[in-house]
Amino acid sequence: MNQRKNKAQAAIMAGLLTLSLAACGGAASSSGTSSTGSTAASSGSQVQVSESSKVATTSVNDGVMSTADLFTDRDMAQTADTSGAKQITVKDGESVSITEEGVYVLSGSAKNVTVTVDADSSAKVQLVLNGLTIQNDSAPAIYVKSADKVFVTTAEGSSNQLSVSGSFTPDGDTNLDATIFSKDDLVLNGLGTLAISSSANGVSSHDDLKVTGGTYTIDSKADALEANDNVLIADGDITITSEKDGIHSENDEDNTVGNVYVADGKLTITASEDAIQATAAAQVDGGVLSLKSAEGIEGTYVQINNGTISIEASDDGVNATTKSTAYTPTIDIRGGDLTIKMASGDTDALDANGNITISGGTVDISAQSAFDYDGQGTLTGGTVYVNGEQVSELQNSMMGGGMGGQGRMGGMGGQGRMGDMGDQGSMGGPGRMGEESTSTTA
């Protein structure tokens, strides 16, 4: 297990270190038939499968995360070979235990049932949901206790529902807190639909959580998609309503993981806190993202290379803050189409405890405070609009005190300002004097 995790982390670290240096500077069993299925490529982010290496790669170069080795052929396959699969129909109160590698087709409707995977640490198990409905009071609908990797695949044309409505009961020392809970790597894919409802987290993995296809509706009281290591999205149609974070990746023991990567897909997230939160890096290479939340995207290093991203936020639109010592907090926009609409008050569209760099793409901001950075603000390419006007520099708002009208008193020293003046010329909150922050134009 440790060797497997180390290899996966090493692949990501190759990209992490490169850009970090630049920035800082009922028992069921089967015959074990496995499936690779057909390979699905995501054209929007140019995710392709290398037949020689059998991994998905993208055309994005020098990303904060190395995108080689993130997705295998089987991760990307949206169908399973069910010719030798074990067929399981769930029944009320009769939990299912899967102890061997293989493909299992689950169907039926039942209450208070947990499908538990407790297999060898080298086993790959595929659960094909084909018209499955499970309604539980206090336990996960799917619980991966032990395996190398588990695939949860929705069958083509199928409609599936998994829900937990009450307080979760722990499994010994394990705090079970998600409708789909996994101690090991978890992949969601398929050609059907899956609705998830949870009184806590929607889907949680203690290792990697990948989504490569399928249609999902997740309604959760806590985080909708959560992982200790990485949340990696290659494709899929995901609609999230969360009373906490939409997507959350955090590892308390290793600050090189806790990443969120989006290659493609459609993400519609409404969250009370962060739409996307990564402890280390958040990277968007493509897709259509519609985010409504307190904060849109948060991480120590946030990189946007492509995609269409719409953010409506009440705190920060994109926030680079010190959550990991692996990076200097940085917002790095290299491409894509980013639209940010901010609520009024002490809010910032782009807020970095370190640097903001824009070298490509289109950024359209509607906000009182467009840019707030403690290090450098650099604009070398792309097109940037603030409240309908194109700008040629990243004017530091510092305290988020507002950019109402044109009235403001010039700062003293560097980019420091003496409090913004609103439309009627009233003086804003106290400004900072003589900050060392700099703004570099193209």
Image: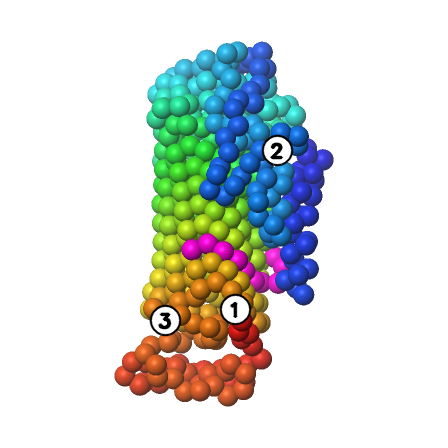
Q: Which of 232 and 275 is in front in this view?
A: 232
Which residue is at the far left? 424
Say which residue appears at 53% left-offset and 62% top-offset: 359
Q: Main secondary structure of the magenta part?
A: loop
Sequence-first disc among 2 and 1: 2
The answer to whether the residue labelled 2 contacts the one labelled 3, judged by CB atoms less than 8 Å apart, is: no
List the residue tagged with mark 2: 50
Please say whether residue 334 is one of the residues in the magenta stretch.
yes
Quadrant that contains the C terminus: bottom right
Indicate yes or no whether the magenta region holds residue 441: no
- First in residue order: circle 2 vs circle 3: 2
Residue 259 appearing in the image: yes
Counting from the top left corner in percent of width and height, residue 203 is at: 46, 37
Image position, residue 137 (x, y; %): 38, 31
Looking at the picture, how far across and down is residue 15, in whole percent? 65, 49
What residue is pinned by disc 3? Answer: 389
The local secondary structure at tag 1 comes to: strand
Query: Are circles 3 and 1 on residues that touch, CB within 8 Å?
Result: no
Which residue bears the numbered disc 1? 379
The amino acid pointed to by label 1 is: Leu
Q: What stretch is highlighted in magenta?
A: 324-337
- Viewer-proximal residue, 249 or 20? 20
Q: Where the N terminus falls, by quadrant? A: top right
Q: What residue type is labelled 2?
A: Ser
Q: Which residue is drawn at 66% across and 64% down?
A: 24
